[in-house]
Amino acid sequence: MAERSTTPAIGIDLGTTYSCVAAWRHDRVEIIPNDQGNRTTPSCVAFKETERFVGDAAKNEATRNPTNTVFAVKRLMGRRFSDVSVQSDMKLWSYKVIDGDGDRPNILVDYQGTQKQFAAEEISAMILTKMKEVAEAFLGSSIKNAVVTVPAYFNDAQRQATKDAGLIAGLNVMRIMDEPTAAAVAYGFDSNDVSSAVKKNVLIFDLGGGTFDVSLLSISCGVIEVKTTAGDTHLGGEDFDNCMLNHFVEEFRRKQRKDISSNPRALRRLKTASEQAKRILSTTTETAVHLDCLYEGIDFYSAITRARFEELNIDLFKKCIETVKRCHEDAGIDKNDIDVVVLVGGSTRIPKVQQLLKDYFSGMDLCKSIHPDEAVAYGAAVQAAKLSGQGTEEIKNLVLIDVTPLSIGIEGLGDITNVVIPRNTPIPVQKKVVRKTVVDFQSNVTFKIYEGERVRSEDNNLLGQFSLYDIHRAPRGETKFNVTFEIDINGILHVSAEEPISGGKKQITLINREGRLSKEEIDRMVHEAERYRIEDDQFKKKVLAKNSLEDEAYSLRRLMEDEKVISKVASGYLEYTAGAVDKVINWLKHDVPKDVYVYNSKKKELQEMCSKLSEMSL
Ligand code: AMP
């Protein structure tokens, strides 16, 4: 059982487009509003000459400062620069992604007057830090422990990258939790199905900003058990926006014979307008996009109907339904045996998606009772409470069983992947396989570890490889190795091998993890994240000091307009004070940020004048 902790633990839904944080407090889960009062925060970071914005402020920067405003970074997590999806996403992004070390996609921005490169993990860490700060401000205590969610269909590298982002943000990631499982927890508690003795088959349909997950679970007697999961880590609202964006870019090309696709600002404005239009089309059947001076002084005006939007995206929508079919078929459960279909994720508001799903389930009513944008953070907060020994008895006794989304295997003869842990195996899991040498008197051996469902290794995803040297030399097939595969509770793989004969054990944990940050890189990033945080803090303090000086100057100016002051204070002193106030206001207008003490000492001077004026007018 978890040890009871007194400090709160939080649940963070780290989304492609929006993130959400929640915590267990006052015997319930509370979704925590950010400094703007919003319950979700844009997963967006903007870099400027003097400061860095995360969340709403960053999203507002997107059209003004498109090349330095980073969004949808979840789509880069754990991926290689050469990935087809990275290459195609980059074309539609207004910020630059370059080929970093080891085929890693690095984000290039101008920050504080210099060009800086950031790994996707670092940008995600900035978003996690923001969510942590939002929670700290709300709960009034510092926070270290968090459960962070990932799409169920995230692979090993993507999970590891998310965990590393948590490390860089200075969080203790207690658990990497699958988003649909978190949503199922929210559903289970909301409907009370979790404590019912009647077993229900629940299908979670989670279509968010950038990822799509389907999980089939059984819920009863305090146990939430994932049977199967399926999905696409690159399918969601962003793709629907991009389809509409491409449609408008084409229209502009056709009508104006001009290509706006190489202009980041125009592209960003049109993308924002496309997302808005998409949202409107979920409630109306037609809408318009109107952007003044979109490109080379030309205005853009276009109308789009819901039917046209659906036509543009129908292949993607149909793909969602095919994934649903695969998910329940993998579990050997007929669609008629599914009791509830729960909608999660902002994109499930699209009427066509709902209609296709309803049709597939022969007209069954879809469950819309849990909040599509908040359910995942809710479930993560329940898990965080459980792991830190907080919450009700029901939470403490809750059992969650997850599965691994992709098969894990080892390369065998003929470049074939031999599956060791098949997909949808409950986790944690440990499996051992015995391998033999393939060449007479072989002295070294290399193991290549893959994930994926294909037979040929080259069609699967290489997770990493490692070698054992100076092994026992013997005719082919005589030297044996025990290779152990372990998938931990976070869905992260650990592989080790031993060759028992050559004296003692040779054990190596999966190293050379493709594209993974090294320990040194993570340490450096932790250090830099802390430096950025301190710089942000100092900047914030300067802004506050500046604003406070400005407030003081204007309130002194108002005081001087007071009848009582005018009648009682000598005109010479009034003139002197007015001059001092004007000087400060002017100075502030042309001010480059100064040290806090400069603002504070000027404020003190004004405060003294203010008290003197008040005294004189008594
Ligand atoms: P999530 O990651 O679950 O927060 O989902 C965010 C995605 O949902 C974004 O792509 C939004 O554009 C999309 N979304 C939110 N509201 C709507 C809506 N009313 N209609 C269509 N898509 C929406």
Image (spheres, helix red, strand yellow):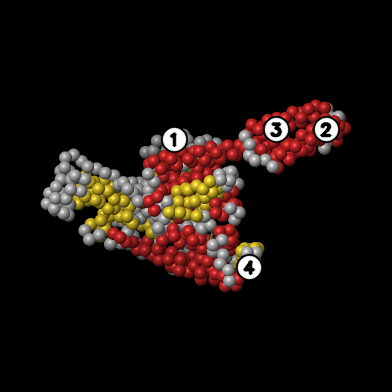
Mark 1 near mark 3, Cβ–Cβ under 8 Å? Answer: no
Q: State the SS at label 4.
A: strand
Q: Residues within 10 Å of mark 3 (few under 14, many from 20)?
A: many
Q: CA distance from mark 1 to mark 3?
A: 44 Å
First in residue order: circle 2 vs circle 4: 4
Q: Read off the residue under disc 2.
A: 574
Residue annotated with mark 1: 5
Q: Position of residue 485 (x, y in %)?
A: 27, 49
The answer to whether mark 1 is within 8 Å of ligand 1 is no
Would you name the residue on which mark 3 appears? 603
Give the spatial CA distance, label 1 vs label 2. Answer: 60 Å
Can you tell which of label 2 and label 4 is closer to the viewer?
Answer: 2
Asked whether the beta carbons under mark 4 and mark 3 sit within 8 Å of each other, the answer is no
Is label 1 or label 3 in front?
3
| Among numbered discs 1 and 2, the one appearing first in the sequence | 1
Q: Is mark 3 within 8 Å of ligand 1?
A: no
Label 2 close to label 3 by CB (< 8 Å): no
Structural distance between the alpha carbons of marks 2 and 3: 18 Å
Q: Which residue is mark 4?
A: 301
Left or right of 582? Residue 502 is left
The reply to whether callout 2 and callout 4 are in contact (CB within 8 Å) is no
Of labels 2 and 3, earlier in sequence is 2
- Of the numbered discs 4 and 3, the one sitting upstream in the chain is 4
- Residue nearest the observer in this picture, 379 or 171: 171
In the structure shown, which secondary structural element does the residue marked by tag 3 occupy?
helix
Q: Nearer the viewer, residue 56 or 254?
A: 254
